[in-house]
Image (tube, rainbow, N blue to C red):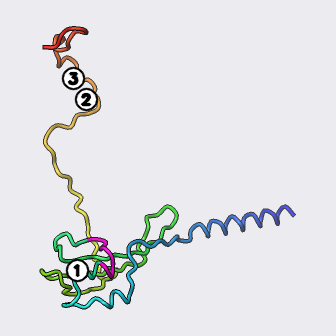
Amino acid sequence: MPSRVRGLACALLIGAAVAACAPTLRERGQRLDEEALAAIQPGVTTAQEVARLLGSPSAVAPFDRNSWLYVRQRLAYRAFLRPSIEEQEVVVVRFDADGVVRAVERRDLRDGRPIEPVADETPTLGTQLSLWEQLIGNIGRFPAQSAPRPGAPLP
């Protein structure tokens, strides 16, 4: 009988461990209404109408103020690992100088490009002091008369 209980406990423990590894899915961003998106017509719809139909954009392109980005991601969180992007959709609405829609584009993960951050460090002026130098560096640097006496009038 004790071996059956031990076997059942092991099976429950393994089942709990496997269940803990299942990803938790979370969605971030805006899920756009397909009918509202279809109502946007290039050359006709204005920026105000787009804002009314789709809401405010997730972001405005940093180098092109006439491009609005609506971003949605579905992330999978697994135990102690970084979340992974399972699905991503970006709708880019481009406007002309008059604020009228010029184009509507859809992008997904396949359209993305990975970037590699530069590992170089920016040099700074000055010296880098060790902890010991910081602790004893000011000893003897200030004359004793620079500190006012308690109760003495200030100059």
Q: Nearer the viewer, mark 1 or mark 3?
A: 1
Q: Residue at 19% x, 11% y: name it.
A: 144
Q: Position of residue 141 (x, y in %)?
A: 17, 19
Image quarter where the C terminus lies is: top left
* Residue at x 14%, y 82% (from the top left corner): 96
Q: Which picture quadrant has residue 53?
A: bottom left
> Which residue is farthest right?
1
Residue 125 picture location, percent across and down: 13, 42
42 or 22, which is in the foreground?
A: 42
| Magenta-drawn stretch contains 55 | yes
Kind of residue at disc 3:
Asn
Alpha-carbon distance for marks 1 and 3? Answer: 61 Å
Is 15 left, or right, of 118 in this rendering? right
Tell me how far mark 2 sits from mark 1, CA to CA.
Answer: 57 Å
Magenta span includes 45: no
Residue at (28%, 76%) from the top-left corner? Answer: 69
When asked about the image quadrant of residue 103, the answer is bottom left
Residue position for label 2: 134
Residue type (three-letter) at the residue carrying disc 2: Gln
Residue 47's label in the rendered image is 1
Q: Label 3: which residue?
A: 138
Q: Amino acid at mark 1?
A: Ala
2 vs 1, front mark: 1
